[in-house]
Amino acid sequence: MAKTRELKRRIRSVENTRQITKTMEMVATSRLKRAQDQVVGARPYAQALGEVISNLYDPELEERFPLLRQVKEPKQAAVVLITSNRGLCGAFNSNLIKAAKSHVEALEERGVTVHAHGIGRKGIGFFKYIGRTWTTERIDIGDRPTSDDAQGVITPLMEQFAEGELDRVDVVFAKFNSPLSTPPTILTVLPIAPPAPGAVRQKGKGGGEGEVEAPTTVANYILNPPAEQILQAMLPLYVQNQMYRALVETAASEHGARRTAMKSATDSAGDMIDSLRRTFNRARQAQITQEIAEIVGGAEALSG
């Protein structure tokens, strides 16, 4: 009797857990749709910026534009790690943390001084646990990042890069390919080095190269004002947009990972409930059989 009561309690407990995970799955699904729309909306603007800069770019402009300054052997680098403020999203945060940790260690092995900038509680908490000090910490950027958030993060780094205090700025984020494919990606946002038109340069986990979407043909622009003046205005916008895309893609990836994790938890809870119910039915059947046997035995004893 005690066993069946315990099984009933376990079944009720798992059913309550399944209800919670199912609700979280539905919430993540609704938020994922909104985040996907934000990612898709950001891509045309990024592509247009990449096309224009790719066609206006000239290596000779590096001396006039600090954001184009190339350093063959960087000595000072900033690494921005973007994670989530909440858990329950599977290996999403741990994958980003591993990618950032490996990248930082690789830079330090080359003699580069790394300044770490954290966005999200999970990444900040892990690196504090292993004893690394953050230069800046941001936990106020939620799952609906804005261009102002991106500007607040990247503007101080652009100023430090322009003044020569930094030689490189990398961002570790989750690239949103689909709800099931969100690989950790390392994007070099500074210095800006657009490829030749028609080329796309991108690396995922452990990479470290920048990503620029460029046209397959060179556009014939009639420029007014001159190219230098246009670049002066567009280069900061381009870097800010790269940061913004990293934020929105990570937010969408987080919702996709949480939806997948909660669906898996809901399915596992359902399987566990089925198993517990079968065990309960077998225990109840054995109990009923035992009671019948006791009644028959008692009746035979009385008749005998």
Image (cartoon, grey):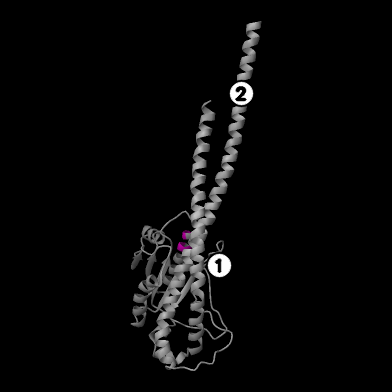
Residue 129's x, y, as percent? Answer: 37, 57
Q: Is residue 167 above or below residue 142?
A: below
Q: Is residue 267 left or right of residue 94?
A: right
Q: Amino acid at mark 2?
A: Ile
In the image, which residues are magenta?
93-97
Q: Is residue 126 magenta?
A: no
Q: Nearer the viewer, residue 100 or 291?
A: 291
Disc sitting over residue 288 in the figure: 2
Q: Amino acid at mark 1?
A: Asn
Q: Residue at x 43, y 68 (%)?
A: 104
Q: Residue at x 57, y 37 (%)?
A: 276
Q: Quadrant of residue 177?
A: bottom right
Q: Which residue is mark 1?
A: 177
Q: Residue at x 38, y 68 (%)?
A: 116
Which image quarter is the C terminus in? top right
Q: Is residue 231 above or below residue 43?
A: below
| Residue 190 visible in the snapshot | no
Q: Secondary structure at mark 1?
A: loop
| Residue 67 visible in the snapshot | yes
Q: CA distance from mark 2 to mark 1?
A: 56 Å
Residue 196's x, y, as percent? Answer: 54, 86
